[in-house]
Image (spheres, coloured by chain):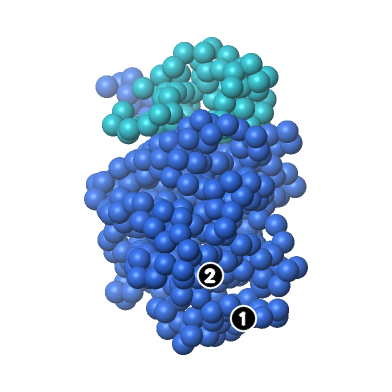
Chain colours: A blue, B cyan
Amino acid sequence: MTKTRSTRRAFLRSGAAAATATLLPMPAIAQAAPRVLVIGGGFAGATCARALKLLVPRTHVTLVEPNSIFTACPFSNDVIAGLRDIKVQQFTYDKIRREVTFIRQAATKVDPQKRTVDLGDGASHGYDRLILAPGIDLRWDGVPGYDEAAAKKMPHAWKAGEQTQLLRRQLEAMKDGGLVVISAPANPYRCPPGPYERASLIAHYLKTKKPKSKLIILDAKDAFSKQRLFQNAWKELYPDIIEWVSLSKGGKVASVDPATNTFVTDFGKHTANVGNVIPPQKAGRIAELAGVTDRTGWCPIDPSTFESKQQPGIHVIGDATIAGGMPKSAFTANAQAKVCAAAVAKLLAGEVPVQPKLINTCYSLVAPDYGINVAGVYRPVNGVLTEVEGSGGVSPIDAPREIRKLEAAYAESWFRTITAEVFG
Amino acid sequence: MAASPEPPPGAASCSGCHAVSAGTKTTVPRIQGRIAADIVAAMAAFRSGARTATVMDRVAKGFTDDETQAIAAWFAAQK
């Protein structure tokens, strides 16, 4: 007993000393447990809430998320191509609810001065640290003619769920000999190789089920992620199906007409049987309401803590961030979330966060048994997450098919592993 | 101060691919609880190209010897 008490006293003394030394506003050790609110239950938010609770169990962590089921975007292109049931993409918050407080609501307002968040049910919640993981919103002003009503005719399928299934149904209903058109946005956007993986897997479906059909990608860019790997694979697997139209060849979509499924470019018109518009994007709306977005629509952050450069006490993780060289992927979101949790734990204790290092690994499937990847290691350099020189890069351009097959299996393993960590 | 449960720089990212939960069906080897020297040796072999890889060659090149040793020691201490 005596030993326990003296240890506790020593701990309290060291805590008081730390508080005096750092001169930072911080809750004293004896005060109530720090309150951390996490908004958004995707790969970033769900990871961060759990990681923080694990690191500092006394923290009162609340995860705010309007949906009771999460539908994962990675591998949703398999659903579109008829290779996977959407149920495999779906996860509940049942396990997370046992570890942190889960509130099934949308956040409607953030007051960074008062440090409160209002929810859809009218309740107001105070916080010591707020973590925003809002993902993306689509820019409905990004493609003239494309709005929420148009998305019911020409799906974006860039948030997994009903839109994914709509695009699948349209492909199933299409006659052989039909034309599929995908429009891809300029950078930055969620999942840089995603439009090209989607084109590949739809082409796989067409080749096996509707071989007279064609697919055109209208691109607002002249270069894209894993480009040589994709293009080599297309030449090998889908030479008569996929056509990529780059920005300089007139690929930028000027407008769409959902009544006729038409994509209009400066060079002409493409009327599709199935039209998939992937519009430009921005950080999820709550980020804008919290004042953490800049004129780009994304969120500048400190690369060590993921604290907003615009609002102290608010951290942003995942797709919504401006994360230097790190692409907007689920792996990135998960990695950032763990770094942010560690930094928030330090900040709540009045300590200085460490300089982090983060990894991204991102697989794409070109066919069910043909995987490619890009990987990178990142660290803060002059306030920007920068790829470590000599590290990272894409799969070898000349790898044999056994390696591509192995990578497809690794991609599946990755999905099971990361979703088990985040939701299991 | 008690030992921090916090992983050293870089280590938190690894569980994105290397499963922590024993129930996860995966072809990627688990690394927690492995002997630290073995992890260090594997990383050195990935970096030099002595051991072939699909991803780890490019990841290993992003870490210094000191960082790799800290990560290996942390994983070795995990159950």
State which chain disc 1 sits on.
A
SS for tag 1? strand
Q: Is residue A31 above or below residue A8?
A: below
Drawn side of residue A265 relative to residue A126, left or right = right
Give amino acid for label 2: Val
Which quadrant does the N terminus of chain A fall into?
top left
Find the distance from the CA under tag 2 to the CA under tag 1: 11 Å
SS for tag 2? strand
The reply to whether residue A289 is visible in this rendering is: no
Give the numbered dot on residue A269.
1
Q: Residue visible at 58% across and 51% down?
A: A234
Whole-percent x, y for residue A396 in the image: 64, 35
Whole-percent x, y for residue A72 in the image: 39, 54
State which chain disc 2 sits on.
A
Out of A252 and A171, give the one closest to the viewer.
A171
Residue linked to disc 2: A181
